[in-house]
Image (cartoon, coloured by chain):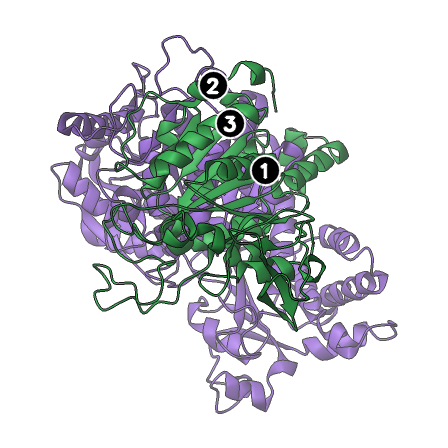
Chain colours: A purple, B green
Amino acid sequence: MAESPASAQPVVTDGTRQQESVVIRFSGDSGDGMQLTGDQFTNTSAILGNDVSTFPDFPAEIRAPVGTIPGLSGFQVNFAANDIYTAGDEPQVLVAMNPAALTANLEDLRPGGVIIVNDDAFTKNNLRKAGYDENPLDNPDALRGYELHRVSLTTLTRGALEGIEGMTTQQKDLCKNGFALGLAFWLFDRPLDSTLAFYAKKFAKRPQVVEANTRALKAGYAYGETTEAFSGRISVPSRTEVPPGTYRRITGNEAIVLGLVTAARKANKPLFYGSYPITPASPILEGLAALKHFNVRTFQAEDEIAAIGSVIGGAFGGALSVTASSGPGIALKSEGIGLGVVLELPMVIVNVQRGGPSTGLPTKTEQADLLEMFFGRNGECPVPIVAASTSGDCFDMAIEACRVALRSMTPVYLVSDGYLANNSEPWKIPDIDAIAPIDVEYRTDPKGYEPYMRDPKTLARPWAVPGTPGLEHRIGGLGKQDGSGNVSYDPSDNEHMIHTRAEKVARIADFIPELEVSGPEQGDLLVIGWGGTYGAIRSATEFMQKEGKSVASAHLRYLNPFPKNLGSVLGRYRQVLVPELNLGQLSFLLQAKFPIRVVPLNKVQGQPFKIREIADKIRSILD
Amino acid sequence: MTETAEATLTRKDFVSDQEVRWCPGCGDYAILAQMQKVLPEIGVSREQIVFISGIGCSSRFPYYMNTYGVHSIHGRAPTIATGLKAVNPDLSVWVITGDGDGLSIGGNHLMHCLRRNVDVKIILFNNRIYGLTKGQYSPTSLGGHRTKSSPMGSIDYPLNPISVAIGAEATFVARTQDTNTKHLQEVLRRAAAHKGTAFVEIFQNCVVYNPTAWDHTTKADVRDDNILYLEHGEPLIFGKDRDRGIRVNGMLPEVVQLGNGVNESDLIVHTEDLDNTSYAYMLSRMQHPEFPQPFGILRSVNRPSYTDMLVDQVQEAASAQDADLSALLHSSDTWVVE
C-alpha cells in the first residue's frame, strides 16, 4: 500500500530514489488522451515486473466542455515492488493538463507531492473555467509544500513535431500527452519500447501519426534527462515474490468476457449473449461480439427486457445464456429473471453495479444493488448470487456463475462493479486444462421423462431442449405441479414449489467452498466485505496487523447462499466490521441471518474506499 | 429441418393432454383446431416445433399444443423466440399473441422482431378487447368503445395491426379470421413456409366481452360485401356478386361498381411481392365501413432473415480464425515471471 513504512523512507542511489510503490495520477480534458496515457504507463510498469492497480475515472458525458471540471478524465496508477490491492489513496505525482485538472485533484495529492502542469494551458480563459481568479502557478502560497514543475507541453510538443507533413497544428497538439508520458517514463526510470511498439501497431495505417507520437514521447523523456528541474528520478523495483507464470493485464469486464467463453468451452455448450448497451457493462457485449469464431452468438436487444427475454429463449434452446447490465437495466430485467426462476432454466445475469438510484452515477462505482438482487422480484423468488472481488477474479467467478447455473438449473447473478470493470491489474493467465469441466448433459431419454422431475442431490430439473424427439413439453410462468409441470392452482402445489425452489438454491451451499479468513483464526475484529472492496479491506487489515492488532479479513464471493461456515467464522471474533459502498446492505443480511450486531462502515460517493478510511475505522474500534 | 415424421403425423399428434379452458364459443378454439390440422402438413417434425406466448387468453395456446412450448410473460414472447431461434435456427418457432399482448405491453418487441426479420411466425389474435382481465379496452378497440375502464367511451385512437407490421418492415403480412376455416388454414400454411418473420392478424371473436366486433366480416348476410379476398396476380374484386372492385383514383384507392364503363382492367391487380411497402400499406388502410377489409397475404417478400445472417457471421468468423482459447487468453501484452 502507498503508506507502507518502506515507501516513506526512500533509499537514495545515484540521485535516483528507490521506493516500494508510487501512485501517479494523470488528469486532463476527456479529449486529452488521459486513459491511453495511463494505460501505457501501467502496461510498461507491469511488464517491468511491478504489481499495478489502476483507477480510471471519467465523466458520463462523452465530451463535456473543454477546460472545465466536469470535462476531466483521470487515470490513477499504483505501481509497486510488493503486492498491492488498490489503486492507492493519495497520488504522489499529479500530471495536470490544465487548470481544472489542478484544482480538482490537488486536495488528493500527498503533501510534498510532485505536480507537473502544462504551463501553456494556464490561459486566462482556462483559469476562469476552472474557477481561478489568478494563476496559482504564479502565486508562491497557492502550491506551497509541493514540488511544482511548469512544463510548456504544448509548445515543446509542437517544436518536437516540427517538419512532420500532413498534420495540422491541432492534430499535433493531440500528441502532448505523449510528451507528458515520456517525461513520466523518465521520472520513474521506465523504458519506452512497449509504448513505441504500441504506437507503431495502433497507427500502422498513418505513418506520420506514428512518427509524431514517437517524437513526442522521446522528446518528453529527453526533456527530463536534460533539464535539471527535477530533484531526482524515482525507481520502483520489480516484485520478487511473484508466482511464476505468464502474466497480462486485465480489467474486470475483459475477465468476464474470457471467463464466459471459457465456461462455454468447459460446458461444451454454445454461448448466447443477449444484452442492451449500458455503462459500465457495454464492453462485455463488445468483447463477446468479436468472438463469433468461438461460436459466441451475441444479440443486441431493443431493450433490457428483450435482452433477458432472449436469454430465456437461448437457455430453453440449450445454450449457455448470459446477459449483463447495470443500475436501471437490472431493474428492468427483474420480471424476466422471475420467469427464469420458475422455468428453472440456467442463465447468468451479470450486474456491473454503478452509482444509483435511478440513472445515478453511470460511470462511478457502488455496491447498492445487493438487496435488489436478493429480493427485487415479485413473490418468493430466490436467485443465487456470486460476486467477484478483484478484476482478475471476474474470470473465476464468471466460470463459477455458469457452473452454479448449469448445475442447479437456475438464473444466477454474477456481480461486478464499475471499479472492477475498469480497473486493471496483472493477471496470471490460467492453465485452461486445470479448470474443472462443467458437467451438464441435455436430457434425451423419453422414458419416464417429466419436465419438473428432479435430481435428488441438487433438485435441478432436466434440461430437455427443443429438437429432442419424445420430450415435447410446455413450461410457463403460472403456478404448477412439481414433476409434471402442469398448471396448478392447488394451494399445496404452490407451497411445495416455492419451498422446492428455495431448497434448491440453499443446497448450492453444499457445492461451494467455505469462507477463508486472512489473518488470525479468532480475535478482536473481523473485517468482512464483498465485491470490489476487497483490495482496500485486505490492505487496511494487513496494515493494522503489522501494527499488532488482532484483526482478520474475509471476503464473501458467494452471497446467496452464503458459505456454510459463515456463521461460525463470524462467531470467532469479538466484533465484526462490514465496509460497504452502500448504506449497509450486507450488514442488514448478516444481522438478519445470524445472531450478531455488526459495525457498518458505509460510503456512497461513487468512489472506492480509500485504505485509510478502513484502517482508521479499525483503529477507532480497537483503540 | 428434419422431415422424417411428416407422412405419419395427424392432427391428433398435436393435441396435448391438457384440458382446453377457453370460454365456450371462443374463437380461439377454431384457431387451435386449424393449427393442429395444418401442422402435420408443413413438413416439420413435431419436436422441431415450438410455440411461445405471452399473457392473455390467446397465450394459453402453447399448453394445448403437443409440441415444445413456453407460456411466458406479458408481451415478451418475441424476445424469447428470438433468443431461441438464435441458438437453434432449425426450429419452427411460432409466437401466439393478442392485441393487448402484442401491441400494447409488447409493442416494442413486436416492432423489433419484425424489422429484424427473425425467422418466426407471429400469430396475433385480434378481438379488440382485454379478455383475461375481463373487458377493458385494448389498443385496437375503436374510438368511443364503452368498456369497464372506458365507461364514457375510449378516447384512444386504435392501432391497425397490419399497418404496424408493414411500417415495421415485416416481410410477410396476412390477415384472416377465426371462423373462416379454409382461409385460415391457407394463411397458416403460407406463414409456415415463409423464411423470415411472418405476421398474421386473425380477427378473433371474444364471445363474452366484445362479441359484435367482427359482425361485419362474419354475419352471412354482409360478410361478402365487407371482405376483400386478396389473390396474387388477380384484380381487387369483392362483393356477394363480385361486382365491385378497388381502383386508384389519384393517390388513393376507391370502391367502384363494375359495369357502366368500369372494367376489371381498371382495377388494381394484387401484387404481394413488391419490395416497396407503399402498396401493402395502402391496402392495410382500407377499413370498414368505407372499404372492405383485405383478407389474405398483403405482402410476402424475400429478405435474408436475422437468424440466417447471424449463423452466416458465426460461420464466416469460424472459417477465418481458429477458436484457440489459450491464444485468446494470451491476446494482450504478456510477460513471464520465472
Give neighbour class at mark 2: few <14, some 14-19, many 20+ (Cα, 10 Å).
few
Q: Nearer the viewer, residue A271 or A211?
A: A271
Give neighbour class at mark 1: few <14, some 14-19, many 20+ (Cα, 10 Å).
some
Which disc number belongs to residue B51? none
Q: Are marks 2 and 3 in contact (CB under 8 Å)?
A: no
Task: Name the residue at the top extreme.
Answer: A447
Q: Residue flagged by tag 1: what amino acid is it?
A: Arg
| Real-space CA distance between mark 2 and mark 3, rounded to the nearest whole angstrom | 26 Å
Q: Secondary structure at mark 3?
A: helix
Give how far across and how far down residue A81 sits, in percent: 54, 45
Front tag of 1 and 2: 1
Chain at numbered mark 1: B
Q: Which residue is mark 3?
A: B39
Mark with earlier residue (3, 1): 3
State whether residue A315 is above or below residue A99. Answer: above
| Real-space CA distance between mark 1 and mark 2, rounded to the nearest whole angstrom | 33 Å
Chain at numbered mark 2: A
Q: Are marks 1 and 2 in contact (CB under 8 Å)?
A: no
Give how far across and how far down residue A240 sits, in percent: 56, 37
Q: Are marks 3 and 1 in contact (CB under 8 Å)?
A: no
Give neighbour class at mark 3: few <14, some 14-19, many 20+ (Cα, 10 Å).
many
Q: Are marks 1 and 2 on the same chain?
A: no
Does residue A480 appear to the left or right of A59 in the view shown? left
Which disc number belongs to residue A442? 2
Q: Residue flagged by tag 3: what amino acid is it?
A: Leu
Q: Which residue is mark 1?
A: B190
Residue at the image position 66 percent from the left and 55 percent from the top: A189
Give how far across and how far down residue A277 sits, in percent: 51, 54
Can the viewer see residue B313 in this picture? yes
Chain at numbered mark 3: B
Front tag of 2 and 3: 3
Q: Residue flagged by tag 2: what amino acid is it?
A: Tyr
